[in-house]
Every structure is written in C-alpha cells, then in structure tokens.
Image: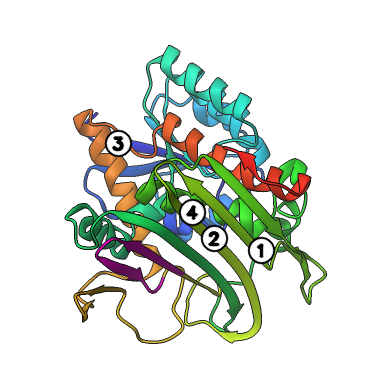
Amino acid sequence: MDRIRVGFIGTGRISDLHAIEYRQNPNAEIVALCDANPSLAEARAQAWGLDNVTITDTYADLLAFESVDLVDILLPHHLHADAALAAFAAGKAVSLQKPMTLTLEDADRLIDAARAAKVPFRVFENFIFYPPIVKAKQLVDEGAIGAPITIRLKSNSGSRKTAWTVPDAARAWRQGPGKAGGGPSVFDDGHHKFAIAWHFMGQAEKVHAWIGETEMPDGSFRDSPAMISFRFPGNRYGNFEVVHSPDLTVLTEQYAQDDRVEITGTEGVVMVNRGHGQLADVAPVALLRDGQLTEFRDLETGWVTSFVHCARHYIDALRTGAPARLSGEEARDVLRFALAAEESARVGQAVDV
C-alpha cells in the first residue's frame, strides 16, 4: 500500500485520538466513517475537517467501499469478533481496538480468518508505543538494571475538572460482563497494564487476583480496589494494583487516571512515573543504579502521544510489509493474561495463564 485510505467503524470519544495520526500523516487519509448514530459520525467529520468523507450507519456498507484499505474498529468489546470477521471477508486490513475479543475461542477465529484471507491484522495497544514506556524498555534491553526480576504496575484513578466526561452509553455497556468481558478497570483499561507486563517480562504462567467493587456517585460500579499478582517463568514475579481515590487530583485532559510502572532487576530499578495523566511534575522515567538517580525528562509525554505513535507504526507497517504489533497472536497472549485475572477472582485461587 502507498497512501492508506482509512474507514472508521465506531466514532465514539476514543476515535478522536485514533484519528490524529491518520489526519496528519501524508501517507494516510480518512475516507469513510460508520456509526450506528450517523449524527455522531457527522460531528466527528466536521470536527476533524473532513470534507469528502462518506458516512454510513452500517459497517457492511463501509466494507463494500473499494476506496477503503484499512478499517479501524472502535466498537464495544462484544462486537469486535463479528466486525473483524466481516472486514477480513471483505479483504480489508484491520486495526482492532483492544481487547481483541471476549474469549480465546473468538480470538482464534480472528487469527485463523485473517491468515486465510491474507490480510494485515493488528490489535491496537497504544501503551507499548508510549515514549516513556519505549525509553524504559530501551534501558532494560540495554542492561541498565541487569536481569529483570519483578514488575509492579499501578492504576490510580481520581478526579479532575478538565477530565473527559464519559458518555452515559459508553459507561453503560462497560458495566456488564456480557458486553465488556470484565470490569472497566481490571479487564478493559487493565489490558494496557497486562500488555506492559507482557512487553517487559514475557507471558505469565500463573495469576492470582483479588478484585473488589466500588460504587461511583453516578450509580455505576468500578472494579477496584484490586490486586493481581502474577508469576513468570524463571523465578520472576509481578503485580498490578488498581485503586480509586475519589478526592485525588490527577492532571489530565482525558481520563482522570495516573499510571506507574516499576521494573526491578539484579542491578537497578527503572520507573515510569506517568501514563494517562500525572500526579505532579515528575520525570517521566527515572533510573536508580549504583547509588545514583538518573532522570529522563526530555521525552514526549501525554497519553495522546501513544496513540500517534501506535497509528504511525501501523501505517508504516502496511506500506513496507513489516510485522505490526500487536499481532493477533500477541494480542491473544495478553487476552489470556487478562482472562486469567478475571477467572482467578471468580474462583478465589491462583489459575494458570
């Protein structure tokens, strides 16, 4: 492919961030939008400055457009499998919002269908393209902390007047496991954290999870506090902590949430100190080694940058034929990780991944 012509299936709030790189990259353009609510798609087209975009309320119509090379599927989780299968059948390249499906069986169906159709397929996981995470991975790969032994991840939601207002419809479908697959913090947003753990440490072999429940002021429920522990091969371990602090101020323009990562090795520690937002003006990445603290402040930050780099990666991969991340197989590994956490909390004991 030379210039990638993109069609969006789903134009909810998150589509604003997905669209940024397609709009600014000279090797891509958005040519079609699909949403069950056409007025929402029309509003996005206007906001994005798209004059010659086709709008439809049925993704079957969008997939029939020969002008579309790539579809970016941004639907509720339970609709991922059917939409992706239809896109493969139409011969389109696919970027599928995480998590790829609700079950491993459906994940296998997508992988097999993409392979049979011989079309490019990746699952959108922006956090592994977030510049502070990229820098931390570079440091680990260069041996800055020796051999990694443990990883700690923390998601801390709070409040901020400048944060996004989550639409009622988006909040509603995330409240039911039949549509969402799990809770909004551990399974949905947690996909990012499981992907980060997988990115640094490889696939876990066992998971033990405790997942609590907190009622929010609007009557919805958040699956926190939660603590998920995992064991990796080679006597290595990790944990993922989720906590909601209602009166904690998070500096953000999107979700009122801070994310932190700490990887400890045989010779040092590397820390990523911000994700969705930030709690204060701290170095995005810090390295502790040999009694010295080294801060890395000259990095792109802000959650938006992870979306830009993730989309840019796929555009380049489609144009060059290079492998794209997350591949279907890689995304299935992360899904296994996330599903194991949900299963462990349900049965009250550690489970194999």
| Outermost top residue | 116
The numbered disc on residue 4 is: 3
The numbered disc on residue 240 is: 2
Front-most of residues 251 and 163? 251
SS of the residue under disc 1:
strand
> Of marks 4 and 3, which one's residue comes earlier in the chain?
3
Label 2 – label 1 distance at C-alpha:
8 Å
The amino acid type found where label 3 is placed reads Ile
The residue pinned by badge 4 equals 192
Query: Which of pointers 4 and 2 indicates the residue nearer the eye?
Result: 2
Query: Which of pointers 1 and 3 indicates the residue nearer the eye?
Result: 1
Label 3 – label 2 distance at C-alpha:
37 Å
Horizontal and vertical percent position of residue 78 = 67, 38
> Of marks 1 and 4, which one's residue comes earlier in the chain?
4
The amino acid type found where label 4 is placed reads His
Marks 3 and 2 close (CB-CB < 8 Å) = no
The residue pinned by badge 1 equals 226
SS of the residue under disc 3:
strand
Using residue 11 as the reference point, say whether residue 71 is left or right of it: left
Q: Which residues are magenta?
A: 260-274
